[in-house]
């Protein structure tokens, strides 16, 4: 029996390889796909990071792999990309599930987030994380990923997030998940976005913090199966 395609989108500072375990859990149920956004992982893209660039990455990948339409699971920034894409190309997506996506952006939020992206501070305070990023981003380099992600967040803060009017126009199934122990994303912003997308659902994923490496992949795979029939 032909399996329906499911595309997994990684978060900021992430890469497709982070989904290896989740992909294994889901391979029996879906035709699972992943990709590195421009400048992430092994990709050596040298331009600026933007939602338009990342949405185009998804469109190009779907075209290259002949995915006329698919379900999308987006973790953190990947969820923001998925919903942004849905506001522009709704016919390309069957349904969306997000986890731990930061929806509320203003200049103060962007400033707070970008302060945590200083490579010298990371090297000094969390050297293990620096090594992880260095091993993960072999294309354009981890420090470039940090600086361009900071610029992207600054742009998001200036833009103020996805306009409510655009959320109101979405007419496809959307499920907004938030880890119950997430300290980066608030329940309020997640409920707000779910409340402005017609028919969208909000739910908590039990005992789940923000970092993808700390998410119980078996639990997450179970929720994905429930949502993407």
Image (cartoon, rainbow, N blue to C red):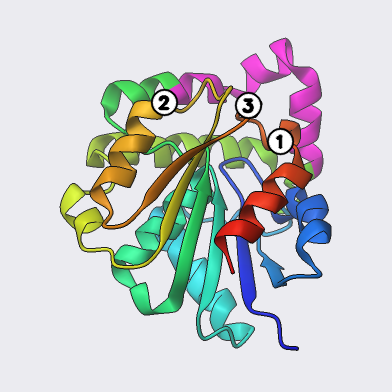
User: Mark 3, residues whose alpha carbon is within 10 Å: few (<14), some, or many (≥20)?
Assistant: many
In space, the residues marked 3 and 2 are separated at their CA atoms by 12 Å
SS at mark 3 in the image: loop
Q: Residue at x 63, y 50 (%)?
A: 223
Sequence-wise first label, 3 or 2: 2
Q: Which residue is mark 3?
A: 209
User: Mark 1, residues whose alpha carbon is within 10 Å: few (<14), some, or many (≥20)?
Assistant: some
- Quadrant for the C terminus in the image: bottom right
- Quadrant for the N terminus in the image: bottom right
Q: Which residue is mark 2?
A: 186
The reply to whether callout 1 and callout 2 are in contact (CB within 8 Å) is no
Residue 45 can be seen, yes or no: no
Magenta-colored span: 113-135
210 or 153: which is nearer to us? 210
The reply to whether callout 3 and callout 1 are in contact (CB within 8 Å) is yes
SS at mark 2 in the image: loop
In space, the residues marked 1 and 2 are separated at their CA atoms by 17 Å
């Amino acid at each position: 029996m032909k399996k329906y395609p499911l595309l997994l989108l990684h978060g900021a500072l992430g890469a497709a390889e982070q989904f290896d375990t989740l992909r294994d859990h889901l391979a029996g149920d879906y035709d699972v796909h992943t990709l590195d956004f421009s400048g992430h992982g092994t990709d050596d893209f040298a331009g600026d990071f933007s939602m338009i660039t990342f949405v185009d990455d998804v469109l190009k990948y779907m075209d290259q792999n002949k995915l006329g339409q698919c379900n999308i699971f987006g973790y953190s920034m990947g969820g923001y990309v998925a919903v942004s894409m849905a506001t522009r190309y709704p016919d390309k997506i069957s349904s969306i599930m997000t986890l731990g996506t930061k929806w509320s952006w203003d200049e103060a939020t962007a400033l707070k987030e970008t302060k945590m992206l200083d490579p010298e501070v990371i090297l000094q305070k969390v050297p293990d994380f620096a090594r992880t990023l260095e091993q993960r981003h072999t294309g354009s380099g981890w420090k470039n990923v940090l600086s361009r992600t900071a610029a992207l967040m600054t742009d998001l803060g200036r833009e103020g997030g996805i306009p409510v009017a655009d959320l109101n126009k979405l007419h496809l199934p959307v499920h907004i998940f938030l880890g119950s122990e997430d300290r980066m994303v608030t329940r309020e912003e997640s409920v707000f976005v779910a409340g402005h997308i017609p028919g969208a659902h909000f739910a908590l994923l039990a005992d789940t913090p923000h970092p993808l490496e700390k998410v119980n992949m078996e639990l997450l795979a179970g929720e994905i199966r429930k949502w993407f029939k």
